[in-house]
Image (tube, rainbow, N blue to C red):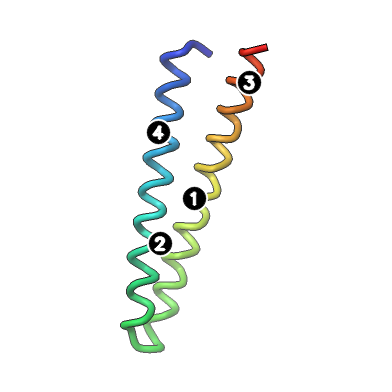
Amino acid sequence: MDAAALKAKIESAKRRLLAAETEMEAALHEIGQTPRSDKKIISGALSTAFAELKAARQELSDLEQVIAEDSL
């Protein structure tokens, strides 16, 4: 993998992390202000955000491993 492709993947992963964190913050803020029946919808949004966050963190970890291997 060349340096430009690696940099693009890292930037993509960072954007995904930021988007997921922003989505989770908004959902957490809403939980305290919603009726009990709407909490199920928010729970679904949080589950989606957590899945995206986990995928992005894994992608970053994989990229960091590639960088470490290339540095040897």
**Disc 1/disc 2 C-alpha distance (Å):** 9 Å
Dot 4: element: helix
Dot 1: element: helix
Q: As displayed, is residue 68 above or below residue 19?
A: above
The residue under the point 59% across, 35% down is 61
First in sequence, mark 2 or 3: give its number: 2
How many marks overall?
Answer: 4
x and y, in percent, of residue 3 in the image? 46, 13
Q: Amino acid at mark 3?
A: Ala
Label annotation for residue 24: 2
Instruction: Mark 3: give few (<14), some (14-19) or many (20+) Cα within 10 Å.
Output: few
In this view of the protein, which residue sits in the foreground, 27 or 41? 27
Camera-nearest label, 3 or 4: 3
First in sequence, mark 2 or 4: give its number: 4
Dot 2: element: helix
On the image, numbered disc 1 is attached to which residue? 53
On the image, numbered disc 4 is attached to which residue? 12
Q: Amino acid at mark 2?
A: Met
Quadrant assignment, res 63 = top right
The residue under the point 43% across, 22% down is 7
Q: As displayed, is residue 10 above or below residue 43?
A: above
The residue under the point 58% across, 20% down is 67
**Disc 1/disc 3 C-alpha distance (Å):** 22 Å
Mark 4 and mark 3 in contact (Cβ < 8 Å)?
Answer: no
Label annotation for residue 17: none
In this view of the protein, which residue sits in the foreground, 54 or 25? 25
Mark 2 and mark 1 in contact (Cβ < 8 Å)?
Answer: yes
Label annotation for residue 68: 3
